[in-house]
Amino acid sequence: MWKSVLSVSVVLILVVILIVTNFTNIGEKQSEPNIIDVTEDTSVEGVGITAPNVQQLQAGDQAPNFRLPDFSGDKVETFDVDQDYILLNFWATWCRPCLEEMPDLQTFENENKDTIKVVAVNTTNRETSIDKVKTFVEEGDFQFTVLLDEDDTVYEHYSIIGMPTSFIIRTSDQKIMKRINGAMTLDQMQDYLKELQS
């Protein structure tokens, strides 16, 4: 009796080992990188990935000044605008929430063009090509300012962790009025602007 129970147990264990080793990826090296979505979700308060010891720029901080090229190669002085505020947005073509946010950014600038200017900084260093970025902007007929951060200098100065990340900055003193981690809707953009103007 015990021999038959032991035999059945050994056979079952061997079958499990056979199934695990032949039909799962346990013990195999991954041929592709482990991809994790690090875009942030603003629908959940307090969600986001932050590297240890990183000091993120927040509301009240001074926004670093910078000059970056546009698609024609001309260097653009970011804070040299007539509007009271800049909505500075960091994005990439591989970031789905970034792409979904773009039409709302355009509408927001169109509806508030005397008060706020949208400046979208593409993290070009993380793109497959500048042509892909340019094609996306042209096909979307986005008219707001798009700048190319080809070596991540501005990305790092603004302590970007996830994308999209946006800042509303007062142009008179370059003070960060609001940091937004994650994509925004048009209604959220309008609400943030109304808060600043009240």
Image: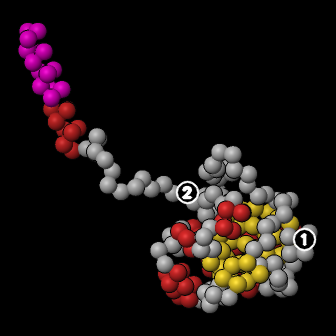
Q: Secondary structure at mark 1?
A: loop
Which quadrant would the N terminus be assigned to in this image?
top left
Color encoding of the figure: secondary structure
Question: Which of the two labelled residues, at mark 1 and mark 2, occupies the earlier sequence position?
Answer: 2
Q: Secondary structure at mark 2?
A: loop
Which quadrant would the C terminus be assigned to in this image?
bottom right
Locate residue 168 relative to residue 37 in the image: left or right. Answer: right
Q: Would you identify the image quadrant in which residue 72 lies?
A: bottom right
Residue furthest top in the image = 2
Q: Which residue is label 2 attached to? A: 38
Give me the C-alpha separation between circle 1 and circle 2: 32 Å
Residue 183 in the image: state x and y as whole percent: 64, 66
Instruction: Give the class, few, some or many, for how many residues have Cα within 10 Å of label 1's Cα (few <14, many ≥20).
Output: few
Give, as a single range, the part of the protein colored magenta.
1-14
Amino acid type indicated by mark 2: Val
Residue 3 among those drawn in magenta = yes
Observer able to see residue 177: no
Residue at 59 percent of width and 74 percent of height: 150
Residue at 68 percent of width and 88 percent of height: 74
Q: Tell me which secondary structure the magenta stretch mostly adopts.
A: helix
How many marks the image carries: the answer is 2
Query: Any mark on residue 173, and which?
Result: 1
